[in-house]
Image: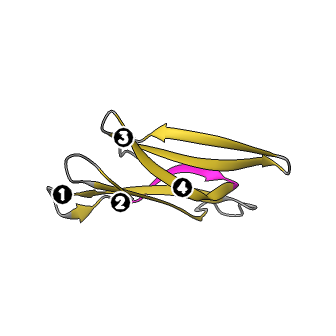
Amino acid sequence: LQRLANGDVVAAWVGASATPNATDASTLYAARWSMANGSWSAAAEVATGTLGGDVRVGTVAGAPMLMWSQKLSPTQTALHQSVWDGAA
């Protein structure tokens, strides 16, 4: 979870892949709590693959930034980041 300067909150989590027949795949989801509306956005799919369970949310110039790891092979893991605009 990360609280933004305007009071909104961004949540990100790894869950089961929405892709049928996906092997060892999981999906990174994110949603935003709007302080102005008092409600959550629909969960957006940010990434799909063999994702690590740890997701971090921070901010860059006031915008939410998501960070996660993805297993590329048995010996290689990549670290990814994305400045998330709230869109699916």
* Residue type pointed to by label 3: Asp
Tell us which disc is closer to us: 3 or 2.
3
Instruction: Specify the farthest residue to the bottom.
Output: 16
Earlier sequence position, callout 3 versus callout 4: 4
Q: Residue at x 14, y 55 (%)?
A: 36
- Label 4 and label 1: CA atoms lie apart by 23 Å
Crowding at dot 2, Cα within 10 Å, few <14 / some 14-19 / many 20+, comes out as: some
Is 25 placed left or right of 9 in the picture?
A: right
Mark 2–mark 4 Cα distance, whole angstroms, equals 18 Å
Please provide percent x and percent y for residue 50: 70, 55
**Residue 7 location in percent, x, y?**
21, 53
Residue at 58%, 49% in the rendered image = 68
Secondary element under disc 1, as helix, strand or loop, is loop
Q: Start and end of the magenta stretch?
A: 43-50
The residue wearing badge 2 is 42
Disc 1 vs disc 2: which is toward the camera? Answer: 1
Q: CA distance from mark 1 to mark 3?
A: 16 Å
Q: Nearer the viewer, residue 49 or 3?
A: 3
The numbered dot on residue 55 is 4
Please name whichever residue, 80 or 28, is drawn nearer the observer in this view of the structure. 80
Category of crowding for the residue at label 3, using alpha-carbon neighbours closer than 10 angstroms: few (below 14), some (14–19), many (at least 20): few
Q: Main secondary structure of the magenta part?
A: strand
| Residue position for label 3 | 85
Pick out the residue farthest to the right. Answer: 74
Q: Nearer the viewer, mark 3 or mark 4?
A: 4
Using the image, determine if residue 49 lies above or below residue 53: above
Give the mark nearest the N terminus, 3 or 2: 2
Q: Is residue 87 above or below residue 28?
A: above
